[in-house]
């Protein structure tokens, strides 16, 4: 069978949700005006996607793995290595990696967390990183690799003998409510059950020293003095979380016989793509933030499909509104996904392309975090049997042809339509 049909997965990060009282009980997707997404639903086959399993709230990493057919229960050893790899840090098997936030702690005690995102700092973090690289290159014989990413995000890799990933998080995961005192960041400790594990104990010690050293290096840094003078919060510490260790994953090309690319908005996806040996393509206008240029992303997808069999693209913006309980922002972000789809409908030949439009998980504005609710999904293009669903949304898609499916089904469904799926049996 000819294998010239292309496959596209477009994910609006965290786009799914729940009914919102302020929207008269509609979800954000249902309330947003989305002519292109509705056209997909009208002419495509709809369904509900639970990436990992019904009711399991996925992380972006485990959701992307699951949708690409890599069982996270088998292969997932923590987010840190993907994050670090995506930021451009080198990650070797055995390394212990963390994602981090530049954060603000009270300058008088160096411990009380005032803002986990350092006022969403968006400049000068390269200078802060440089200071850390120069002054904290090594702790107790463990090599320290550290690099910044967009906004407050950064990553840390520990490389050396006698370390492992069985340790707790430093980031307290909550900001003080207005008018309330913050809580101190957490000391890194061996995970329950690993208290006597010398490697876990040593790793925790190194992490705690790293965090203390960060405050010493950053608190008086010129960038932060400037920020304080401007009435901004200083990025005077880096708080590690999301620990993990490097894994071996079967390359995407070997697993599927497809030449795959990812159009990248988030470091995590970039890191996963690198793990899978896929081509990583940056859209020039993609910021990973609220102001991202979705048309630039769509143009990059179009270009990527000219010389790849498979492209996965992710638009991060909807997830940000979900986490911030920001209804208006999330509506705008869903419209950005709609604009990207409108561009692709104009430019791609869907007689020879099959696409799935979905999300990697729900991030309901009513929850402010990822939930395990099913995600509205649409298959559109080559081979797809259109169903009776007339619009894209949580309740509309639940009535579709595809029913309720999981991440492990997605590549099977898409490669079946594209004609690249081998028959199972004679
Ligand atoms: Zn996500
Ligand atoms: Zn999220």
Image (cartoon, rainbow, N blue to C red):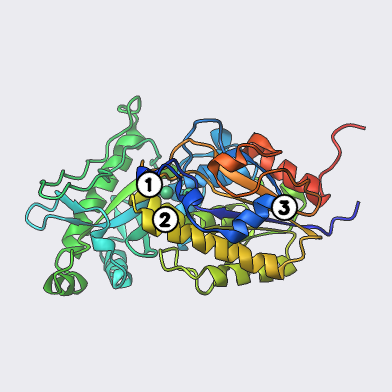
Tell me which numbered mark, 2 or 3, is placed earlier along the sequence.
3
Given contact means CB atoms under 8 Å apart, are the residues at marks 1 and 2 in contact?
yes
In this image, 57 relative to 381: left or right? left
- How busy is the neighbourhood of tag 3: few (under 14 within 10 Å), some, or many (20 plus)? many
Asked if residue 242 shows in the view, the reply is yes
- Marks 1/2: CA distance? 8 Å
Is the C-beta of the residue carrying label 1 under 8 Å from the nearest atom of ligand 2?
Answer: no
- Marks 2/3: CA distance? 25 Å
**Going 28% across and 66% down the picture, which residue do you hit?**
121
Q: Position of residue 41 (x, y in %)?
A: 66, 50
Q: Does 195 appear above or below 140?
A: above
In this image, 258 relative to 222: left or right? right
**Residue beneath label 1, please?**
365
In this image, 348 relative to 4: left or right? left
Is the C-beta of the residue carrying label 3 under 8 Å from the nearest atom of ligand 1?
Answer: no
Secondary structure, mark 3, is helix
**Residue beneath label 2, please?**
330
Secondary structure, mark 2, is helix
Foreground tag (1 vs 3): 3
**Going 14% across and 50% down the picture, which residue do you hit?**
178
| Residue 43, numbered circle | 3
Q: Position of residue 130 (x, y in %)?
A: 31, 70
Q: Position of residue 63 (x, y in %)?
A: 54, 43
Secondary structure, mark 1, is loop
Looking at the figure, which quarter contains the C terminus?
Answer: top right
- How busy is the neighbourhood of tag 1: few (under 14 within 10 Å), some, or many (20 plus)? many
């Amino acid at each position: 069978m000819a294998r010239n049909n292309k496959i596209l997965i477009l994910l609006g990060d965290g786009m799914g949700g729940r009914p919102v009282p302020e929207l008269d009980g509609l979800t954000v997707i249902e309330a947003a005006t989305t002519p292109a997404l509705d056209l997909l639903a009208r002419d495509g086959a709809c369904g509900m996607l639970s990436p990992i399993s019904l009711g399991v709230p996925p992380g972006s990493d485990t959701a992307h793995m699951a949708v690409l057919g890599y069982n996270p229960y088998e292969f997932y050893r923590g987010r840190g290595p993907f994050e670090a790899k995506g930021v451009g840090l080198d990650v070797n098997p055995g390394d212990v990696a963390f994602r981090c936030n530049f954060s603000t702690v009270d300058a008088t005690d160096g411990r009380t967390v005032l803002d986990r995102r350092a006022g969403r700092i968006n400049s000068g973090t390269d200078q802060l990183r440089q200071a850390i690289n120069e002054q904290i290159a090594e702790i107790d014989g463990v090599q320290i690799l550290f690099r910044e990413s967009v906004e407050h995000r950064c990553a840390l890799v520990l490389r050396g003998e006698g370390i492992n990933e069985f340790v707790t998080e430093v980031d307290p995961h909550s900001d003080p409510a207005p008018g309330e005192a913050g809580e101190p960041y957490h000391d890194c400790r061996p995970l329950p059950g690993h208290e006597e594990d010398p490697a876990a104990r040593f790793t925790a010690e190194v992490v705690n020293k790293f965090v203390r050293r960060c405050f010493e290096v950053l608190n008086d840094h010129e960038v932060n003095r400037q920020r304080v003078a401007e009435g901004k919060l200083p990025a005077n510490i880096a708080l590690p979380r999301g620990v993990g260790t490097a894994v071996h994953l079967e390359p995407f090309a070997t697993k599927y016989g497809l030449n795959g690319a990812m159009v990248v908005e988030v470091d995590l996806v970039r890191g996963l793509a690198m793990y899978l040996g896929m081509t990583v393509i940056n859209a020039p206008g993609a910021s990973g933030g609220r102001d991202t240029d979705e048309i630039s992303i769509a143009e990059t997808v179009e270009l990527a499909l000219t010389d790849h069999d498979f492209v996965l693209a992710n638009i991060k913006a909807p997830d940000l509104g979900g986490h911030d309980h920001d209804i208006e922002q999330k509506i705008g972000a869903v419209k950005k996904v709609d604009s990207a789809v409108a561009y692709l409908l104009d430019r791609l030949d869907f007689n020879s392309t099959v696409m799935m439009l979905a999300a990697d998980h729900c991030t309901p504005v009513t929850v402010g975090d990822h939930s395990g609710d099913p995600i509205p999904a649409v298959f559109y293009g080559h081979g797809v049997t259109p169903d009776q669903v007339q619009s894209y949304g949580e309740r509309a898609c639940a009535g579709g042809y595809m029913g309720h499916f999981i991440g492990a089904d997605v590549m099977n469904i898409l490669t079946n339509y594209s004609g690249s799926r081998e028959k199972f049996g004679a």
